[in-house]
Amino acid sequence: MLQLFNSKLIETDIDRADENNLFNKDLAPTKKAERTWDTYHIAALWIGMSVCIPTYMLASGLIAGGMNWWQAIMTIALGNIIVLIPMVLNAHAGTKYGIPFPVLARAPFGILGSNVPALLRAIVACGWFGIQTWVGGQAFNSLIGILMPSWAVYSWGPAAGFLIFWGMNVYFIVKGVESIKWLEAYSAPFLIVMGLVLLYWAYIKGGGFGPILSQPSKFQTAGEFWKFFIPSLTGMVGYWATLSLNIPDFSRYAKSQKAQMTGQAIGLPPTMTLFSFIGVAVTSATIIIFGKAIWDPVELLSKFNSPFIIALSLVALIVATLTTNIAANVVSPANDFTNLFPGKINFVKGGLITAVIGIAIQPWKLLSDYSAYIFGWLVGYSSFLGPIAGILICDYYFVRKLNLNVKDLYRRGGEYEYRRGFNVRALLALACGVLTALTGLIIPALGILYDYAWFAGFFISFAVYYFIMKKPEQEYSSSPQTDEI
């Protein structure tokens, strides 16, 4: 742990064998020549992912639940500062060894057991892909309606906008990771400028930031506040709990540990806090300007008189949603599905599987109300992701002391074979963490466990995994086999 952030990049030399079912070019360790992402690219990645409609509307659910504006913003900021810690820790292995998340998961869970956390992560990403595609599709439908007023008469307009935006996502899936780097790098400054312009408009037109910013908290006692704050904070951590697992998918392209650490610190908490505040401040101004609070930015833009301003703003929303969706909700599940069948599924095929499942999940139901969104969706899936994060961090830092046998991550019968490819101990630790969190959902008296789902699952799985992995190595390792890369 003393040399945590000063380790040098390691370039591995693995013989490529097409017949090996644990390896393909998308899962292979990145070479030094491929590690071209500097601090700006990492920061731009997070700016592009954070500036999106769900972030803009994030504080609305907290305010609707009873918080005042600064309590909501504080909760969002604190949640992102907390989730930054596992984000940076898990990113370290990606930068040091050049490996993606599902390959890193092979170390604690086993060569085949890694598919369990990978698929849990992938399913969540598919849900998020559907949410972002639905939101972006509605913005695209509004943009078409401005450019072609007759478009509004067609009842199938929203569906067409959704499919067009879905197709835009598929385009970048087919183009691959380098296209994502390009998209994030060029869109980040544009998105920040557009957000600040919107904030300036609200301030001028609203004569300052009014009703919502002056609205007091609805909680009568500290007990009422904490009862709402705890699950809300868990929801905020859960918002990026997905990326805290698969951040190696991106950090494997970073030039150095400093680049990934600094880039994430600059790009994540400040952007999430700023854009959430813009959502609160602009909505506050809409009460004065239009007589009612308008949280949905697409609905807000429909109130403008200038077609040019509306079109430009919608383009910004579409770009914001696209950058978030591609980076946050495609790269990880694409790699996760690839890890399932490396010989048959590559990055593109994995991304296309994600796109199809994202539609089948019916994302519009997840956005039905703030309670379903924050307490059902965000807190619910954090009960699965927190335990995975706990096991990954415990294994990499406390069991293996930052040392991985990269060659054995791609072959059967090596250090990570365990028992027929599965580390039963890791799966047991995962089950303990998940069940602990979900117990609070089943037993009302233990509801705090579900309210703290991510935290409870993280620490329980961390502790259980560390304790049971202290036994001698021969008790959980198998003898070497001949199926090598």
Image (tube, rainbow, N blue to C red):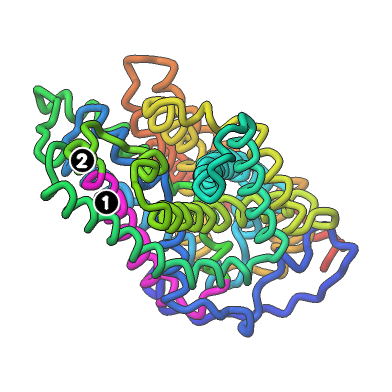
Q: Disc 2 to disc 1, how far (Cα)?
A: 16 Å
At a point 31% along the width and 47% down the height, the residue shown is 79
Residue 268 seen from this side:
yes
At a point 49% along the width and 72% down the height, the residue shown is 185
Q: Position of residue 43 (x, y in %)?
A: 41, 69
Mark 2 element type: helix
Tell me which segment is drawn in magenta. 253-282
Secondary structure mostly seen in magenta is helix
Q: Quadrant of residue 459?
A: top left
Residue carrying label 1: 278
Q: Which mark is residue 289?
A: 2
Vertical placement of residue 113 versus 309, above or below: above
Residue 474 seen from this side:
no
Mark 2 or 1, nearer chain start: 1
Q: Which sits in the foreground, 450 or 290?
A: 290
For the N terminus, the image quarter is: bottom left
Horizontally, is 356 left or right of 183 in the view? right
Q: Position of residue 396 (x, y in %)?
A: 51, 60
Horizontally, is 12 left or right of 446 in the view? right
Horizontally, is 251 left or right of 440 in the view? right
Vertical placement of residue 268 versus 223, above or below: below
Image marks 2 and 1: residues in contact by CB distance under 8 Å = no
Q: Residues within 10 Å of mark 1 (few under 14, many from 20)?
A: many
The kind of residue on which mark 2 rests is Ile
Q: Position of residue 388 (x, y in %)?
A: 52, 45
Tell which residue pokes out farthest to the front in this image: 150
Q: Which sits in the foreground, 171 or 297?
A: 297
